[in-house]
Image (tube, helix red, strand yellow):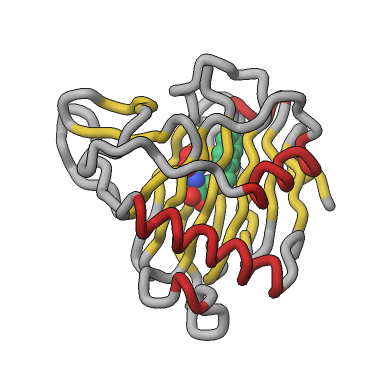
Amino acid sequence: MSEIARGAFHHPGYLDAAAQAALARDIAGVISDAPLFVSRMPKSGLPMSVRMTNCGPLGWMSDREGGYRYEAAHPETGAPWPPMPRMLLDIWAELTGYPKPPEACLINVYSDTAKMGLHQDRDEADFDAPILSLSLGADCRFRLGGPKRADKTIAVTLSAGDALVLAGPARRCFHGVDRILPSLLTPLPGPLAGLGARVNLTMRRVT
Ligand code: MD3
Ligand code: FE
């Protein structure tokens, strides 16, 4: 584990190959009940380049009219999000030590060309709880800045099996995904093969 910035704890290879495979089965099950969808930017309606879905009591989404928000149901099926797999609850408890369970797990699926611009996560009422991220599949170049958009940034490679805990000051930092790195050597595990190059899970408290 290394603290890459104040409050940002990187655990390279936290999940071994067997744990990544078990997690991939759970996530494939979530996607079969809650299909991947495309969120859109508020006002412009431009589509994001990642496809997403969620599990847990609340899920993150965005559309042109309603903007960034958490909802209890899938925007296309209207069904409640699938439950958070036990494995994710256990990892949250072990890595964050936070006394309450995560309320939302956002599942982002990246193609080889998908990216995520620099942004802050500020759609949650609870800014003091940590955020936990887990990565599967291709490496990406992840960028972490400071609390202001213009602050200097660092680049970090996030690889399959890595965990990243954002606590304290890191929770408010700008961050994004510059690009997905060549994925031939690190395909997504079998149950997720064909969906894209990289999957990232972010677990959060919302309320
Ligand atoms: C640093 N996801 O879903 S995960 C997001 O790889 C998001 O899909 C990226 O940013 C991805 O909002 C990055 C790592 C991460 C997640 C949340 C953070 C880093 C963060 C919140 C604050 C600071
Ligand atoms: Fe984010």
Image point 63% across, 61% down: which residue?
Answer: 157
Q: Quadrant of ligand 1?
A: top right
Residue 15 occupies quadrant? bottom right
Residue 193 occupies quadrant? bottom left
The answer to whether residue 151 of the structure is visible from this angle is: no
The answer to whether residue 52 is left or right of residue 104 is left
The answer to whether residue 61 is left or right of residue 120 is left
Count of picture labels: 0
Q: Residue furthest right?
A: 1
Residue 185 occupies quadrant? bottom right
Give the x, y percent position of residue 172. Answer: 59, 25
The foreground one among 172 and 88 is 88
Q: Residue furthest bottom?
A: 184
Image point 55% across, 43% down: which residue?
Answer: 84
Image point 31% across, 54% down: which residue?
Answer: 36
The answer to whether residue 131 of the structure is visible from this angle is: yes
The foreground one among 33 and 110 is 33
Image point 56% across, 79% down: which residue?
Answer: 186
Give the x, y percent position of residue 182. Answer: 48, 77
Give the x, y percent position of residue 144. Answer: 59, 42
Residue 113 higher or lower than 121, as above or below: below
Give the x, y percent position of residue 57. Answer: 47, 31
The answer to whether residue 174 is left or right of residue 75 is right
